[in-house]
Amino acid sequence: MRQLIERLIASTTHTIVAHADELTALDQAIGDGDHGLNLKRGFEAVRDAADDIAARPFGAALHKAGMTLVLKVGGASGPLYGSLLMAMGKAAAETPASAAAVATVLGAGITAVKERGRSDAGDKTMLDVLIPIQQALAADAERPIAELVQDLRSVATAAMEATRPLQARKGRASFLGERSIGHVDPGARSSALLVNAVCDVVEEIRK
Ligand code: ADP
Ligand code: MG
């Protein structure tokens, strides 16, 4: 358990740090250019607290990681990703192993993001990646999660790309109106990166 949590922290932090400039560039196009920096600060704080976080049961570890993001990230994305992880942590009584269990836990997280952000599918946000991923998990509920990894990676990429033609209805990008059309949403990109980072861990563990 401890090792799984440690791997998840290492993998997600690595991808966010490696793509921080790209996330910032996306946010420069339709926001204020801080998304990469925001998430880098948040995930590095989670990594700094890895020993404390990984000593907890799975749900409590997720919750603590979420609280760390809320506390460390100034932008909208910190409280939103923080709410996602905190609600997922509350929903995860034990480590979710099947696609069905992950779908339930992620569903609880998505509900919390929607409430906090007053947002939903189609608003050109992180939800436009998280919701299709949850739906893909729910649709293949009986399959072991390891078998779904390739599908989930494809769903994340396609969902992220599908934010490009949308007009933003929430967050800073919404201030641009029609000028937000034609750009990938930064939070959709970070969500796709995080999905892939989790998939990397699932594949690593299977080896
Ligand atoms: P800020 O907008 O405060 O500068 P960030 O740049 O870190 O914060 O994050 C921007 C991202 O947060 C957006 O690309 C979008 O995906 C997500 N986001 C913003 N507002 C909302 C919302 N109300 N609901 C869901 N996601 C949102
Ligand atoms: Mg920003």
Image: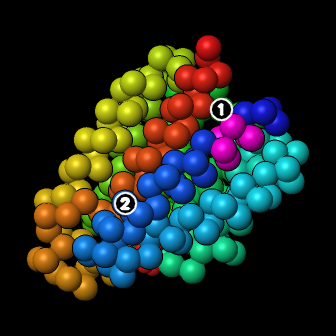
- In the drawing, does residue 100 fall left or right of residue 155? right
Q: Quadrant of ligand 1?
A: bottom left
Residue on which disc 1 sits:
96
Residue 100 seen: no
**Residue 120 position in % (x across, y down):** 35, 63
**Residue 115 position in % (x across, y down):** 49, 69
What residue lies at 82% left-to-right and 36% top-to-bottom?
A: 2
- Is 6 included in the stretch rendered in magenta? yes
The main secondary structure of the magenta stretch is helix
Mark 2: amino acid: Glu
Residue 42 seen: yes
Going from N to C along the chain, the mark reached first, 2 or 1, is 2
107 or 45: nearer the eye?
Answer: 45
Q: Residue furthest bottom?
A: 175
**Residue 89 position in % (x across, y down):** 69, 50
- Is 2 included in the stretch rendered in magenta? no
Model colouring: rainbow
Mark 1: amino acid: Pro
Does any atom of ligand 1 lie closer than 8 Å to the CB of label 1? no
- In the drawing, does residue 5 fall left or right of residue 139? right
Q: Secondary structure at mark 1?
A: loop
Per the rendered image, the range of residues in magenta is 5-10
34 or 106: nearer the eye?
Answer: 34
Quadrant for the N terminus in the image: top right
Residue on which disc 2 sits:
22
Label 2: few (<14), some (14–19) or many (≥20) C-alpha neighbours in 10 Å: some
Label 1: few (<14), some (14–19) or many (≥20) C-alpha neighbours in 10 Å: some
1 or 90: nearer the eye?
Answer: 1
Which of pointers 2 and 1 indicates the residue nearer the eye?
A: 2
Quadrant for the C terminus in the image: top right
What residue lies at 71% left-to-right and 59% top-to-bottom?
A: 46
Circle count: 2
